[in-house]
Amino acid sequence: MKRAGCLVFAVVPVLVTAAVYFATPEHAATATSDAKGSSSVSQKAREKAKAGAERAADDEVVADLPPGLAAPRKKELAQQLVASAENSTLKWHEAYGYIEDIGDGQGYTAGVVGFCSGTHDLLTLVERYTRKHPDNGLARYLPALREVDGTDSHEGLEPGFPKAWRHEATIKAFRDAQDSERDRVYFDPAVRIAKLDGLGTLGQFIYYDAMVLHGPGTGDNSFYGLRERTMREADLPSEGGDEKSYLDIFLDIRRKAMKSRNPDRDTTRIDTAQRQFLYDGKLDLDTPLEWKVYGETYRVP
């Protein structure tokens, strides 16, 4: 808030200059424009400062809460759960080199959380990796990745891109880059907002999986849109709502979103995994855990 106050004082000289211009008719329009512009800048500065203060306050709240899904063993479990749905394995460390077009209209799906050439996250990963490692084997495909972003096209990527991806995944720096991007875009934001919403470890994972599958957007079928739709039907646990009821409704809405694009889409990552954990009272995701995805049974002792 102090920063906002300083910025208000900073625009005073501009406003005084504007008053002088008002005395001269030919400068009236300019003065009005300057005044409006200064006001707009000041308003944006106040909003930014307010947002910064609110985020700092939220950071303090999150810092005082138990680690939940961010605890090392729980985070490892989260990657196993996601891998069972994304790659049909618990060995998520083997998924760095995974790449294929699964026919979902999002181009190539690749890596530990299914970065897609059609949904911008794969492009962002390669761009950020290339800034640190400009001579990597994927850099030459950046122009093509920018062209196909937002589509299911492979133009400019075949036949070499899948092979280049698999080779790059043998390099530790690229595996680290995948982990970093996964955490920056999906894991950390999901865990943070779940904690602020009053959700325990299972709820944090449900948010994370939704972030991975639906993307961190604000559309109706993206993560923040799904959360907004759920909040219209149930109170957040942080606001006194029942955690199980809230998560049950969130999973209902997620399932409908998955089916809206393809009525035949498999939803067992919800039906016989996350919802089963919820009904079994596994709100802390304590092991042992057993679940099914695509009809295959997985166990973590």
Image: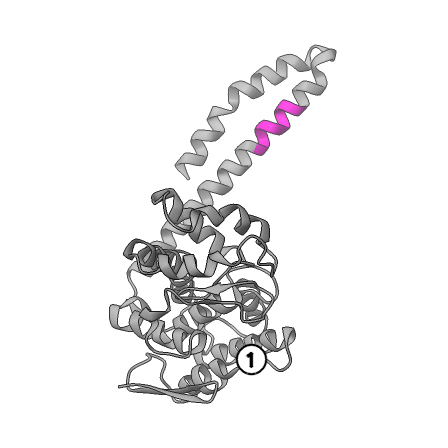
Q: At which x and y percent is residue 131?
A: 38, 43
In front: 82, or 233?
82
Furthest-front residue in this view: 159
Q: At which x and y percent is residue 128?
A: 41, 47
Q: Residue at x 37, y 69 (%)?
A: 95
Instruction: Please tell me whether mark 1 sits on a helix, a strand or a loop.
Output: helix
Query: Residue type at mark 1?
Result: Asp
In front: 90, or 224?
90
Q: Quadrant of residue 21?
A: top right
Vertical order, 95 against 280 (above or below): above
- Name the colouring of the figure: one colour
Vertical order, 168 against 301 (above or below): above
Furthest-top residue in this view: 24
Q: Residue at x 37, y 50 (%)?
A: 56
Confirm whether the magenta stretch covers residue 253. no
Q: From the image, which quarter does the N terminus lie in?
A: top left
In front: 201, or 289?
289
Residue, disc 1: 252
* Mark 1 residue crowding within 10 angstroms, few (<14) / some (14–19) / many (20+): some
Q: Residue at x 38, y 77 (%)?
A: 81
Q: At which x and y percent is residue 160?
A: 47, 57
Confirm whether the magenta stretch covers residue 37. yes
Q: Start and end of the magenta stretch?
A: 33-40
Q: At which x and y percent is residue 210?
A: 48, 70
99 left or right of 41?
left
20 left or right of 237?
right
Name the magenta segment's main secondary structure: helix
Vertical order, 163 against 251 (above or below): above
Number of numbered callouts drawn: 1
Vertical order, 272 against 129 (above or below): below
